[in-house]
Image (cartoon, rainbow, N blue to C red):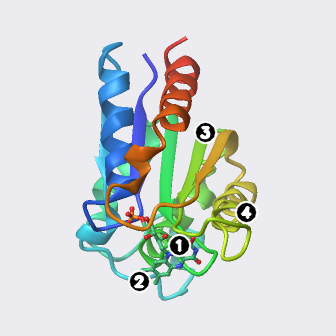
Amino acid sequence: MAKTLIVVGSRRDGNSNYLATKIKEKLALKRVVSNIIVPGDQKIYVCTGCMDCDKKGVCDFKDDMIKNIKLIEDADYIIIITPTRWNLLSGDLKIFIDRLNPLYVKGTLKNKKLIAIAIGSSCSDEYSSSKALKSLTNFAESASLNVVLEEYFNNCLKYNDIEKQEEKLNKLLDKIDKLITS
Ligand SMILES: Cc1cc2nc3c(=O)[nH]c(=O)nc-3n(C[C@H](O)[C@H](O)[C@H](O)COP(=O)(O)O)c2cc1C
């Protein structure tokens, strides 16, 4: 059974967390166990760029990235959900992603499957979530992750606005379910 890790880039109990919970519930119906992590709620030191991990394959910092890296190593599917921030991924996610460099060095990320999702408040291409999504797929390209699905949601400003897009939400849940469980 495929193992799934869901990484949520927003700390608030808003749209990204709502979607993560829905994905977890959907997969649980087929007995797929998924873990949700919210890097912003964890203790994660910011990468200093020392590049020691290039030589050793591990980071000197002792923080929550130790358990996160184990979860990533175990996962067949990684689902990253970012709130759109200035057309980009969230800062919490960037800090998390930078600390994955030891895995790049070891080649662990190569060909793992990534589902990339961005959620923003804009209703148009201006300040768009498609661009935030691109920052996730740019990371995937650099890390040799295999992007198997990408999606973005507009018009999500308040905590639960994504609930109003029921049809799109359900279609996405079905696609994720099909990918991971079949
Ligand atoms: C600092 C900041 C920058 C933001 N920049 C954008 C943006 O460029 N485009 C956009 O559509 N929404 C932007 N938003 C709105 C959020 O993406 C939106 O509220 C989204 O629902 C947040 O997801 P969450 O509910 O999971 O926190 C921004 C929000 C913040 C706090």
Upstream in the sequence, badge 1 or badge 2? 2
The secondary element bearing badge 4 is classed as helix
Residue at the (50%, 43%) spot, across then down: 78
Q: Residue at x 40, y 41 (%)?
A: 5
Question: Looking at numbered disc 1 in the image, what kind of residue is underneath it?
Answer: Asp
Per the rendering, the mark at residue 138 is 4
Give the quarter of the image for residue 23: top left
In 3D space, how far apart are the residues under numbered discs 3 and 4 (Cα atoms)?
A: 15 Å
Contact, mark 3 vs mark 2 (Cβ under 8 Å): no
Of pointers 4 and 2, the one earlier in the residue sequence = 2
Which of the two discs, 4 and 2, sits closer to the camera? 4
Viewer-nearest residue: 120 or 60:
120
Residue where numbered disc 3 is placed: 112
Identified at 25% across, 60% down, the residue is: 13
| Residue plotted at (67% across, 69% down) | 128
Q: Choose between 60 and 49: the one closer to the eye.
A: 49
Disc marking residue 98:
1
Q: Position of residue 54 (x, y in %)?
A: 60, 71
N-term mark: 3 or 4: 3
- Residue beneath disc 2: 46
Question: Residue 38, position in %: x, y?
Answer: 31, 60
The type of residue carrying mark 3 is Lys
Q: CA distance from mark 3 to mark 2?
A: 24 Å
Decide: is 181 above or below 61. above
